[in-house]
Amino acid sequence: MKPFFSVVISIYNKEKFIVQTLESVLAQTFTDFEIIIVNDGSTDNSLKLIQNFQDARLTIIDQQNSGASVARNNGMAAAKGVFIALLDGDDIWDPDFLKYIHEATVVHPDKCVFTTALAHLYDGKIIPVTYSFKSDADTLVLDYFKSSQQHTILSGSTAVFKKEILKTTGVFDRQIASGQDTDFWIRIGLHYPIVFINKVLVFYVYNRESLSNTTTNLSLKPKFDKYYDEENTNKYLKLFLDRNRFSLAILSKLNDDTASYNYYRNALSKKNLSLKHQILIDAPKWLLKMLLKIKSASGKKAYHVAS
């Protein structure tokens, strides 16, 4: 008999976090699930740590390092469940995460994509994410782009979807080495409404290195060119993409990548940015670095990209 959920976790050098991540899955109050962990060629003790767990629901796929997209795609291909629940190897689920998702699938049997509110864990503090909508409702059915203007409602640890939608959306793009999540969420958002459970049930674990490190190869990031036709007819997609382009333009400037900065700067409509962002996008690098230090000290990412 098929499990209801297939929990897919891809890991690369997550020895500091994977034990607490896996324990949070095994502690779920809804128990009809399998776990598929794809070890993407870790060079630390990640593989040994997960091999210490003895649970019949756990399957480990050990592969040569091929990147997060390939690892997730291999995990999803092996999934036997009706629904796939993604989880990053350093994040934590509330014990009732799958329970709430399952209840939502019963209430919304015609819907295919589900998610919950998210909080950041930083130095022992829980910082709930601020979304671009406010509601006291327990559950909402949302347009992905309209509701993700401030922070994406889908993430690599909150997204749960019917496996069958992959026939429509496709899988993670292996040609995108960084930011592949955003590209995947866009394809989901173009086809499906999102059932949002308005309760923090997932915790994103931040560390100081991830907050302050802005060094990145911008050529590995998505360019969003393939959505040109869609963004011309979907104003909320256009807004969503322009705010991501803003973040990528800022990262480009911080990395002294003038070509990438000019690309993202010219691709966006400045009118779609807040007044603050309109000023920042043309600000000098020294000012951006100073603001980055201030934001990092407070436990916030300075320039947020959707994924």
Image (cartoon, grey):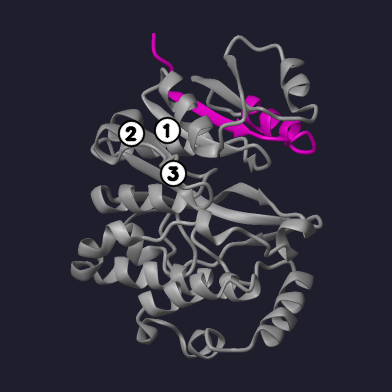
Residue 199 visible? The answer is no
Please say whether residue 268 is one of the residues in the magenta stretch: no
Q: Residue at x 38, y 68 (%)?
A: 240
Secondary element at tag 1:
helix
Residue 304 percent location from the top left of the image: 56, 67
Mark 1–mark 2 CB contact (< 8 Å) = yes
Q: Residue at x 40, y 59 (%)?
A: 137
Secondary element at tag 3:
loop
| Residue corresponding to mark 2 | 106
Q: Quadrant of residue 222 in the image?
A: bottom left
Residue 253 appears left or right of 143 = right
Residue 23 percent location from the top left of the image: 70, 29
Q: Which numbered circle lies on residue 175?
A: 3
Secondary element at tag 2:
helix
Relative vertical location of residue 81 with respect to residue 9 in this rendering, above or below: above
* Amino acid beneath label 3: Gln
* Amino acid beneath label 1: His
| Residue corresponding to mark 1 | 102
**N-terminal-most mark, 3 or 1:** 1
